[in-house]
Amino acid sequence: MINYNPKEWASFIFHIHKADTFRKLWPLMLGIAVFSAGIAYLGFHFIDMTQLPFVKNIGMMHSLLGFVISMLLVFRTNTSYDRWWEGRKLLGALVNVSRNLSMKIKALNLGSEEVVFFNYAIPKFAFALKEHLREKRLYGKDSVLIEIKEGAHFPNQIASGIVSRVYGLQAKNLISPQQLMILTEDLNQFTNICGGCERIRNTPIPYSYSAFIKKFVFFYVITMPFGLVFSLGYYMVPIVPFILYVLTSLELIAEQIENPFGLDANDLPVDDICNNIEKHTAEILL
């Protein structure tokens, strides 16, 4: 995730960050500029485009479709931002439940062996969830305190190990049934959070919808030179690529944030959140 000062306007306007969509779009913008210049040249020197039937009404078509495409892009970006924000709320809930469970374990005054186990296992669930959402085989800190089956669902394995340890404490009469019920409320949150994150990751925007927007934007922009050639002339050469940049950037931004757990510049700071959970758990328990 990019850390920035929202009050520094100059850096936003004049600095091109590696995550800026301009870096990805400039070859397409250059191609559209050349295409626009070619249409203008043909219209002024070789072809009387006023005689082409579709050119006469293309301006009206763009006026009507402009509203439609704006609504589609607004819905697209809002949907992706909702996914991004829901992911942030789930990770925030993971931070809170890790702290709450650590505080309750600390208050039980258990032996050092149990404290070491929970100091290891609670943050390890966060690391395992992070790698699981990124579809990697790693799962955070290496240890043998919890046995992980090869090819298994790592977060579930770790959560299961924590639950088994807590139930073992109750079986040894180290905690009361009432304390077990209180701890179970926090333990259930681990799998709830994991399921919520998986729902976001495993349910992308429908392919047909995403493909339709891309095609719609492309054909909308590619027909603009025919409607602007008579009113703007060669001035449309920079204007049409700029319109392409605005419309396509919204789609690219939506693509970046619809899966907020990855490594894109605009994704959530999952690594920092996991490191903070590890740090805060150790501060509470040790």
Image: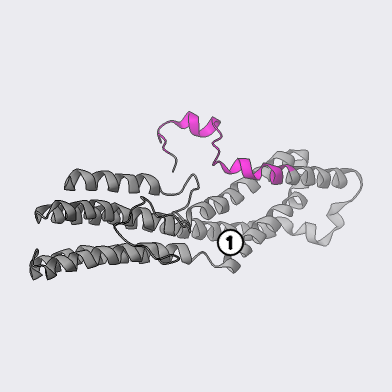
Relative to the observer, which residue lies in front, 284 or 264? Answer: 284
Tell me which residue sits at (87%, 46%) in the image. Answer: 42
Q: Is residue 62 magenta?
A: no
Residue occupying the point 78% across, 43% down = 34
Residue 88 visible, this orientation:
no
Quadrant for residue 196, please give it: bottom left
Q: Is residue 280 above or below residue 122?
A: above
Residue 190, percent across and down? Answer: 29, 62
User: Where 124 sits versus 1, above or below?
Assistant: below
Which stretch did the figure color magenta? 3-30
The x, y position of residue 58, in whole percent, is: 73, 58
- Quadrant into which the C terminus falls: top left
Quadrant position of the N terminus in the picture:
top left
Between residue 144 and residue 53, name the one nearer to us: 144
Residue placed furthest toward the front: 144
Pointer 1: what residue?
A: 68
What residue is drawn where x is 42% and y is 35%? 4
Drawn side of residue 129 relative to residue 171, left or right: right
Left or right of 18? Residue 233 is: right
Say how the picture is coloured.
one colour
Indicate the position of residue 118 as horizontal and vertical percent values: 22, 55
Image-quadrant location for residue 151: bottom left
Residue 114 is left or right of residue 42, and the answer is: left
Is 5 part of what is drawn in magenta? yes
Residue sitting farthest toward the right: 46
